[in-house]
Image: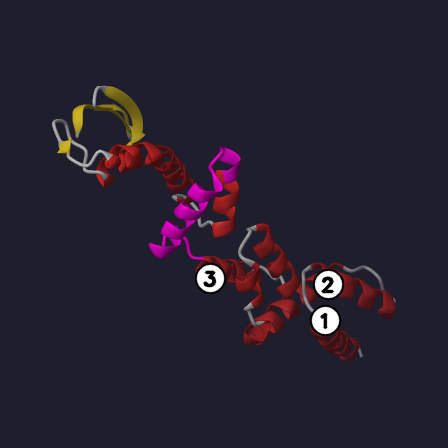
Amino acid sequence: MIKVNDLKKRNKNRYIVSLNDKDYDVDENLILHYHLVKGKIIDDDSVLDEIIADIPYYDFYDIALSYIEKKLKSSGEIKFYLKRKGASEEIIQRIVSYFVEHHLIDNERYLQVLIDHYLINGYGPNVIINKAKEKLIPSNIISAVDFDDYSEELTEYCQKIAQKKLKLIKDTDKNQIKIKLQRYLLSRGYEYYMINNIVKEILWKRKNYLI
């Protein structure tokens, strides 16, 4: 038999719970999960082992919640963060699985947010993919993206930043202008075939405008 002898709030989300006259410092989510209230009696003695085993889980659960509450995070970022905090692999997997199941993290949505952000700021697929990898989004989700679906947006934004860059290039030699434009667009993550077509088009229009 297990008796909740006492239950006192220690701070915002921590409690001191006395189970069979032994005190435990626990997260409030553990209290809620096991419905612990002062005077409660639990007939099954094995529940005490479950509660004790779950103390570190709910400690790291609360840490993970705080980590994701202000900004989108990927499952990989959460795993890395919890590992640095000292969580076991078992606890990490359990927390991440719970977060995914309850839509507290969504790798596909996170990737879409990244794609939209970097597209509109003039970056191409290669930069976007690298940024997604930096955010530790699972590789299978990244590889599932088909950038052909964004061909119109990519062309539009590539043209815009190419035009802006062209105005900043002081060279008068056509080959140097072409090389500098190509290098710049490559650094922004665009594919060479798109760069080649857009640079040709821009330089052709410029030549005819000057004529």
N-term-proximal mark, 2 vs 3: 3
Whichever of callouts 1 and 2 sits on the residue coming sooner in the sequence is: 2
The quarter holding residue 140 reads: bottom right
Say whether residue 90 is magenta. Answer: yes
Main SS, magenta residues: helix
Nearer to us in this view, 100 or 38: 38
Q: Is residue 141 left or right of residue 171?
A: left
Camera-nearest residue between 16 and 126? 16
According to the picture, the residue beneath numbered tag 1 turns out to be 195
| Residue type, numbered disc 3 | Glu
Residue 88 drawn at (x, y percent):
47, 38
- Tell me the CA gap for discs 1 and 2: 8 Å
Q: Is residue 201 visible?
A: yes
Q: Which residue is mark 3?
A: 108
Q: Residues within 10 Å of mark 3 (few under 14, many from 20)?
A: some
Residue 158 is left or right of residue 15, and the answer is: right
Which corner quadrant holds the N terminus? top left
State the mark number for residue 186: 2
The span shown in magenta is: 83-106
Q: Are marks 1 and 2 in contact (CB under 8 Å)?
A: yes
At mark 1, the secondary structure is helix
| Quarter of the image where one finds residue 160 | bottom right
